[in-house]
Amino acid sequence: MGATTPLWLFGDQLGRHFHATPQNRDREVLLIESAAALGRRPYHRQKLHLVLSAMRHLAEELGDRATVIRARTYREGLARFGRPVVVHEPGSHAAAHLVAELVREGVAETELPTPGFILPRPDFADWAEGRKRLLMEDFYRDQRRRFGVLLEADGTPVGGTWNLDRANRERPPRQATLGVPGAYHPREDEIDHGVRRDLDRLHDEGGIDTVGDDGPRLFPVTHAEAHRALRRFVTARLPAFGTHQDAMLAGDWAMAHALLSVPLNLGLLAPLDVVRQVERCQGDAPLNSVEGLIRQILGWREWIWHLYWHLGPDYLDRNALDATTALPSWWRRLDTTDVAARCLHVALEGVRERGYAHHIQRLMVLGNHALQRGYAPRALTDWFATAFVDGFPWVMPANVIGMSQYADGGITATKPYAAGGAYINAMSDYCGDCRYDPATRVGPDACPFTAGYWAWLDRNDSRLKGNRRMARPLSGLRRLRDRAAVVEQERHRERY
């Protein structure tokens, strides 16, 4: 296959760093809309919209260079195309397995590393070799050194410290919103209208089963839109990003968050370009904001991607806490009708309305609830990957199995991220208008997070007693005078 062999792009490989490089700019581009892929799981309606809209906008941008095939499966689309293709490293184990089969059959070759991530996979394998713990902080510092990001001339970190996370944990202000300039908001066009009609038809025909609301498109789907969103963030929102990064306000779903995960995960933004643009904002934005965003992309995002491949598909079966509760139907269908806990109601409502909740809502509300209630980690991972507009197969395993649910037994986190209502009360404005009391653990006003935390500790006492960071909470559990009452109450709780 030569330099002009057509390039097949998946729906998360749509940026110019995939198709406009010297290696690829002369290639015809093949895009396949697979009905089987769209209908494989109950994806959020707005997620399917974003992927299809992005693919169709790219086809319009490329003009005669692009061939779009709508087929039942990728294999069927490739057969109809009728010519061999080259392909970048795909973004899931299932896609990698398919590509490997296609390579063996002579239909494709996978010789192009993905430009959607900064560090090549062989380099991560070298970094990970021989390490007992694959801690993100160690990886992040290595990334900073390797790519020369936020470093002084002598190689020390700008500001004298590598991680300014402690400066990013301020409680929310006493106001309804954070009061920062709004994020970039794209305008829908005729392509979006066509996508909506096609999704309606597929739903009516039984080809797809979606969750969540339809709604106006909130995130970029083109190169131009993605760069407008990035520019809007770095010029208007980055200064406020850091300080309240872990705070939650019921009336402000976006806060000062970058909202760039969708264009990044669709492959519309080159991650190192984003890092460099944010790095240049030193002086115009506080260092804790600059470093915090860089850590999310150069550290966290890269780390999660590489762990997906390093830990392999069997990682999804990890279940160190033996959590086996099936996801309830109201959770799977994003039905908040009977959810009275305001924090949980607001977070799930945001997922239903937008397919989005910011990271602290994901970890300390949704993930915390799932951890306390013992939801099966693999099913929960699938839910996060399908119900969120920025969820893709590689994104969620280490985030959910490891960080959120501690189901890997400590490979990615040094302790479980479990907390009671006191944490949520401190970091949000949810609890003031909630029918539950975060300081109460027994009775009709008992907060399901406060009571749930102690019941979860009771259930996992023997599993966690070897973790030094859990010694203090477990000691508190043993001093809890109403322990038995809390455990019995939460065993029978049906309403949250």
Image (tube, rainbow, N blue to C red):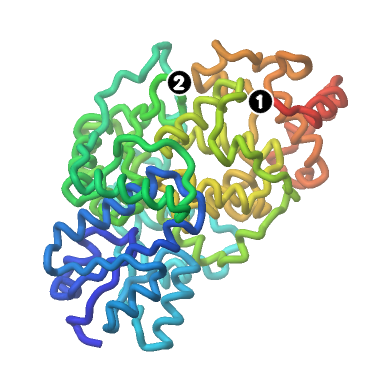
Q: Position of residue 400 (x, y in %)?
A: 57, 48
- Would residue 346 be visible to someone looking at this image? yes
Q: Dot 1, crowdedness within 10 Å: few (<14), some or many (≥20)?
A: some
Q: Is residue 79 left or right of residue 328?
A: left
Q: What residue is disc 2 on?
A: 250
Label 1 amino acid?
Tyr
Q: Is residue 278 left or right of residue 170?
A: left
- Would residue 164 be visible to someone looking at this image? no
Mark nearer the N terminus (2 vs 1) = 2
Tag 1's secondary structure? loop
User: Based on the displayed image, in which of its 4 quarters is residue 444 positioned?
Assistant: top right
Q: Dot 2, crowdedness within 10 Å: few (<14), some or many (≥20)?
A: some
Q: Which disc is residue 496 wearing?
A: 1
Residue ID at (69%, 25%): 495
Tag 2's secondary structure? loop
Q: Is residue 239 left or right of residue 321?
A: left
Above or below, 194 relative to 430: below
- Which of labels 2 and 1 is toward the front? 1
Label 2 amino acid?
Ala
The foreground one among 488 and 162 is 488
